[in-house]
Image (cartoon, grey):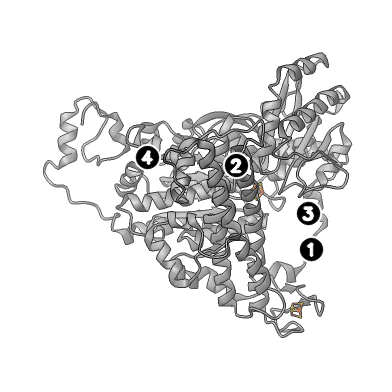
Amino acid sequence: MTKKFEGSDQVSLDLLKRMKESEIESAFDRYDLQQPQCGFGQLGLCCRHCQMGPCNVDPFGRGPRRGVCGADANTIAARHYVRIVAAGAAAHSDHGRSVAQLLIAVARGEAPGYRITDTKKLFEVARVFDVSTKDRKIEEIAEEVGEMALAEFGKAYGTQKFATRAPINRQKVWEKLDVTPRAIDREVTESMHRTGMGTDQDYNNLIMQACRTSLADGWGGAMIATELQDILFGTPKPTRGTANLGVIKEDEVNILVHGHEPQMSEMIAVASTDEELLNEAEAVGANGISVAGVCCTANEMLMRHGIPLAGHMKMQEMAIATGAIEIVTVDIQCVMQADVDVSGYYHTKMITTSPKAKITGAEHIEINDENAYEKAKDIVRMAINNYPNRDKSKVFIPKGSKSQLVIGFSHETIKYMLGGKFRASYRPLNDNIMNGRIRGVAGVVGCTSSTVWPDQQPYMELVKQLIANNILVVQTGCAAAECGREGMMVPEFMENAGDGLREVCEAVGMPPVLHAGSCVDNSRILIACSEMVKEGGLGNDISELPVAGACFDWMHEKALTIGHYFVTSGVFTIFGTKTPVAGAPVVDKLLCEGLEDIVGAKWAFEPDVNKMAQLMIDHIEKKRDALGINVKKERKLYDMADRRALEVEGSTVQAGCEPGIAHSHQKKD
Ligand code: NFS
Ligand code: SF4
């Protein structure tokens, strides 16, 4: 059955057509070639954890019901699930570890080219880590914060320090279940151990380990990545940017930065402004040097510096197939090996920069903390020298394919935007949720993948339905890149929002769809939820908030880990795919029903985007009912709001308006 979604991604369709004409294979072709994909794998019922296997379990009872060791469907599916969560946690966290190492190197003066940018954030993290700031040099504080962060990965005792930022009641839920994450590496290692042959063979116990490991990501490794990157590269503030393949310049040297860690891309961006290199670019006939991003590196660069975003995960081959890329540099995660082949059809050079990620056929130039700027300059120079090799007849940059967007909505920004510079607070957001202008908040995050053909745009449709129902949308990852590319992240898009949400967006001047960053930056959403609880009026735990999370087509294991830490943090989360444990309905029931009684939130898997939106809306309304904020208040004669409205002649504030964002219209209070 073909799914009908909003819009069509013409740019991607044009590029895919072009690739086909040039006989370049795309991930979409390879996806077709993989059909039909293994049914056991799709059901989560394939186990290869020991040499007696691989074992498959037949969910229809016609074949084996157990593996050679006796593992049943529940055990096999739950073990598989835990391994996905552990792999995702490992990916985000290893990224976080590199940032901690870089912070230490910068503090010790061993990383030329980098600096400490946000001391306010440094002090905030120092406070959480119990690092003294009194009468100490910034470098001293930064070094100790870096060391403390590094210790979070392997400490012998205690639990994750950032977990103390969660509301007290949430922490109590975790303590009671004994899922407060210990050292990050320990949780990942223990997950691998428990899921091997012959260890943990109780699906309930396995899913609890998935809870603990996912929290080690969200409130551990991923949060360390976000917070320490903010210290080093700056906490994002609202900035204008551009997105889509049209950001690639026909007459400039183009460098595509792809991957996840900003360490590499930040230096390439700096090197691209080097006077000497700009002169060299001019000497080869180029009008400048242009850097554009793909995947989460793009989100990082866009959020902090407004550096254009060429595309999200499933567009990486298309970006190279514009034929106008001199160099594509990659570090870690979500990089397709096929990029080497696509590059090979053009003059494009592909360069790997991380010792953790080499790709056969790509050139390796290692970038580390000490040599980053020099190596980045070398790479930019290589791109310049490659510019004359560009075959103009192969260049294809779809015309008009460039969208404007406003980005940079860190949780601090949201606080400032809503509360104002002098009284930054979540009070106005909570008040507007309580008075019903905003019904709730939805996180729409995660991947794009080759399982969805570009004539379908599920993220657009989902987000449109949510904002039309007065739900404020916060986005990260490739889902954010997709909606940003489609022009949904500008204040003008508020005309698609419901009346209440539009009123708030108008008063504050913000889009109804907020870009909060890369996938590790989902930790910003965890903090925002915690702040909403602490602000008061919306219950005493994240699980009481009228919020929901969604990802349509998750691709990388990281996305499932994110989903699981949101659920374990108390947020109803829905993915637009089939359940990853479809072959074990009992485990599926635990994820999609049972967990609600245990952690206060549950999963849903629903491939129909309309049903997905409705489930989120229903959930948010259910939470509003439980909070008692859906009850219409009885009007008193001349209540506070009436008096205010009378006092403010000519003001746009209406009678009945409660304290909130719209008060920024008031001339006096
Ligand atoms: Ni997230 Fe970023 Fe995109 Fe998915 Fe990959 S780029 S870390 S995993 S595909 S959203
Ligand atoms: Fe088969 Fe059990 Fe070995 Fe898995 S662990 S491959 S189910 S024998």
Q: Is residue 602 above or below residue 510?
A: below
> Residue at coordinates 71% horizontally, 37% vertically from top-left?
370
Please, what secondary structure does the residue beneath circle 2 have? helix
Pick whichever of labels 2 and 3 is earlier in the sequence.
Answer: 3
Which of the 4 quarters of the picture holds residue 350?
Answer: top right
Cα separation, mark 1 vs mark 3, equals 9 Å
Q: Which of 119 and 217 is in front in this view?
A: 119
**Mark toward the viewer: 2 or 4:** 2
Pick whichever of labels 2 and 4 is earlier in the sequence.
Answer: 2
> Residue at coordinates 22% horizontally, 41% vertically from top-left?
656
Please, what secondary structure does the residue beneath circle 4 have? helix
- Outermost front residue: 135
| Residues tagged 1 and 3 counted as in contact (Cβ below 8 A) | no
Q: Which residue type carries mark 4?
A: Asp
Pick whichever of labels 2 and 1 is earlier in the sequence.
Answer: 1
How crowded is the residue under tag 1: few (<14 C-alpha within 10 Å), some, or many (20+)? few
Taking 83 as reference, is 542 left or right? left
Name the residue tied to disc 1.
Answer: 36
Name the residue tied to disc 4.
Answer: 499
Q: Which residue type carries mark 3?
A: Tyr
Name the residue tied to disc 3.
Answer: 31
Cα separation, mark 3 vs mark 4, equals 42 Å
**Which x, y percent locates residue 177?**
47, 72
**Which x, y percent locates residue 196?**
71, 74
- Outermost left residue: 637
Residue 103 tag number: 2
Q: Which of 381 and 336 is in front in this view?
A: 381
